[in-house]
Image (spheres, rainbow, N blue to C red):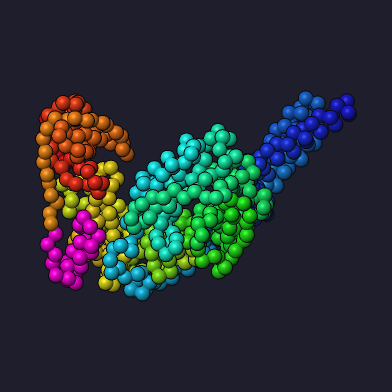
Amino acid sequence: MATRSIVFRLIGLVAIVFLGFVLNFFMLPAWSFRSSSMYWFLLLLFVIAAILFGFIECLLEELKIATIISACGCGVIVIIGIISFFTSAQIFHASSYQSLIDIEEGNFTKEVVTVNNLHNISVVDVATAQKVGDRTIAALENPSWYEVDNEYNLIIYNGEQYRLSPINYGGFFKYMKANTHGIPGYVLVNSITQEATLVTLDSPIRYSPSACFSYDLSRHLRNQYPSYIFGTSFFEIDDDGNPYWITSVKTPTIGLTGGLKESSFVITDACTGKSNEYSVENLPEWIDHAFDLDYLMDLVYYNYEYINGFFNFSKTGVNRTSYNYRDSSFIGYNTTLSTDGVVFYTGVTPANNAESVLGFLLANPRTGVVKFYDCSGAEESSAQAAAQGLVQNLGYIATFPTIINVDGIPTYFMTLKDNAGLIQRYALCNVANYTQVFQASSLEDTLTGYRTLLGKEDIPQEEPIKMMSASGEIAFLYTAEIDGYTYFYFTLTGSSNLYMSSIENSNRQVLLQIGTNVNIEYTPSSEADVYLVQSISF
């Protein structure tokens, strides 16, 4: 009986050890006494052990020694969790969380680059970059194996602005097909010209968050640094176009596990997997993104939220940012340039009044420095509405604005897109007075017209949008779904012009067929020989 008991308990112990290796493989906890992930791992393992040994010892009808030991292990972890809560919780340490970041006062005139022409301003936002960049993957030898990530961060590469995004494996089964080939490259979208380029590498990318097993970036980093608490990984390229992953290392600063601060960074060669750790001060010059925006905005949230302690139900003195993912599904931010390089922009409003801004923040993802610029005026949605009001007959949608410096005046810059997501026009709006807004079809005319509103230049005479008309029989007809909208593409007999009409023009368009006589009014689009139908009858 004693031998049977020992054998069963040994089998249970082996099962728990094996299960521990399996859980460690998938959970990848940081093996540090200040890591909450390690305690969650141990708690889960002790719970499973208590259940398993309880079952075994019930079968043996013996004293549940192993079960008691496992249950005691659970109790110890729970006690540590309680200690961690009381030493780290925001409710008890609001002032410590509030001081995690020192928001500096910025000088708008000196630190936000003065715009002499809009050609040095990024006109390509993330959504536009996704549209043009994702199409480049068709040039790969086996495009079905891969997909372009939605990251598209703004970087400075060889003196020019680009939006950069890595290529991912399309899933586990596609990885099993593609892993011997690796990931062939990455996508660059010129932020000024909107030109997308698929960059292929001599040596493929092997290490990626989308890879599996030992090539999974998180698992690779955990094997190299078992005790590190890692944050977000960003894809970057150096001055020669070589790919790297930049991963933050977090250190608890409040209690046992609270107040995580990004203290250093691990740079991993995406092709070879070689990693090196750097302090913030020693990061290579080519890195534009190291600090995670969510992390920086968390610190800003604590700084604003706990300005008058944790129990501040009236929100006295509390501010909010447009990047307010805690209280809203809308996350408002954009990327721009300052004298310090690439920065994230977001507005600051009073907690109880979202109709106006107190100023705005520029967060530097390379240095982690966040600066506040005092500039009261209209919040971003008001500027968007003002810009859209100038082209309401065309139905264009304004993008979330970014901040630029026009002759020392804080100014919102927006692009105006049609229903297909194509940039049709540009708009500038005075932050302090959103009635001073101007839009035009070219960057030069937009800046000139806006300066006129500010009294900086003579009034230009902008040509009105030219509305053209045509009629005839449909010679070619094709329908497509774009962003949830149905579009009808057609040509007319005797013309090579391709017309594009949204279903919003008329629901009767579902009856269109080759040979139907139509009368249309249309305007040019940003693509040659493609025209946007504004009205249609037949």
Instruction: Report the span colored magenta.
Output: 439-462
Q: Quadrant of residue 156?
A: bottom left
Residue drawn where x is 46% and y is 57% of the image: 293
Within the magenta stretch, is there residue 75? no
On screen, residue 269 above or below 409 = above
Q: In screen coordinates, is 409 left or right of 348?
A: left
Residue drawn where x is 12% and y is 44% of the image: 468
On screen, residue 535 above or below 225 = above
Q: Nearer the viewer, residue 138 or 342?
A: 138
Q: In screen coordinates, is 448 left or right of 106?
A: left
Q: Nearer the viewer, residue 137 or 153?
A: 137
Q: In screen coordinates, is 379 left or right of 56?
A: left
Quarter of the image with the N terminus in it: top right
Quarter of the image with the C terminus in it: top left
Residue drawn where x is 28% and y is 69% of the image: 116
Instruction: Find residue 176 and report its horizontal and vertical position in percent.
Output: 58, 35
Instruction: Find residue 281 and report its horizontal and vertical position in percent.
Output: 55, 69
Instruction: Find residue 437 and report its horizontal and vertical position in percent.
Output: 20, 60
Within the magenta stretch, is there residue 454? yes
